[in-house]
Amino acid sequence: MESTMDPESGMFHKGEKEKCFAYTVTVACDRNSFVLGLKATLGMYMTVKYFPMCFQKVIEKHPEIEAVVVDAG
């Protein structure tokens, strides 16, 4: 299935009934909520798949990072 409004978006599934065309953004922030890095992907791909790539880039730029906290997503 492809969106007629935005063919580059992906089909996002939230639960069994909710579906929409969307993008997913993985964001890495510091303790002050400043964005250190992000990765935007099609909505059909799970964030967990792209977090390691995003985090690796952040660590390369900020090797002083000692701890990571993530949500259940």
Image: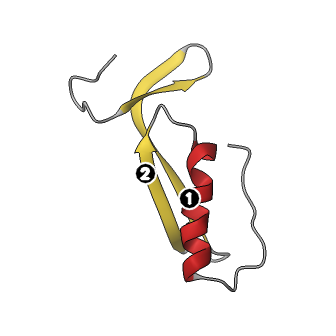
Q: Secondary structure at mark 2?
A: strand
Q: Amino acid at mark 2?
A: Ala
When the figure is inspected, residue 12 is found, relative to residue 39, above or below; the finding is above
Q: Secondary structure at mark 1?
A: helix
Note whether residue 33 is visible: no
User: Residue 26 location in percent, x, y?
Assistant: 54, 53
Foreground label between 1 and 2: 1
Give me the residue at 43% from left, 51% from top: 40
Picture quadrant where residue 49 is located: top right
As drawn, the residue found furthest toward the top would be 17
User: Residue 46 location in percent, x, y?
Assistant: 57, 38
Near mark 1 (Cα within 10 A), the count class, few <14, some 14-19 or many ≥20, is few
Q: Amino acid at mark 1?
A: Met
Q: Nearer the viewer, residue 62 or 31?
A: 62
Which of the image's four quarters has the N terminus?
A: top left
Q: Does label 1 or label 2 sit earlier along the sequence? A: 2
As drawn, the residue found furthest toward the right would be 67
User: Residue 25 location in percent, x, y?
Assistant: 48, 50
Q: Which residue is mark 1?
A: 53
When the figure is inspected, residue 9 is found, relative to residue 62, above or below; the finding is above
User: Residue 41 location in percent, x, y?
Assistant: 43, 45
The reply to whether the C-beta atoms of the residues labelled 1 and 2 are less than 8 Å apart is no
State the scheme by which the image is colored.
secondary structure
Note whether residue 44 is visible: yes
When the figure is inspected, residue 55 is found, relative to residue 72, above or below; the finding is below
What whole-number distance in Å separates the C-alpha atoms at marks 1 and 2?
A: 11 Å
Number of dots carrying numbers: 2
Q: Which residue is mark 2?
A: 40
Q: Is residue 47 left or right of residue 2?
A: right
Picture quadrant where residue 47 is located: top right
Give me the residue at 69% from left, 86% from top: 64
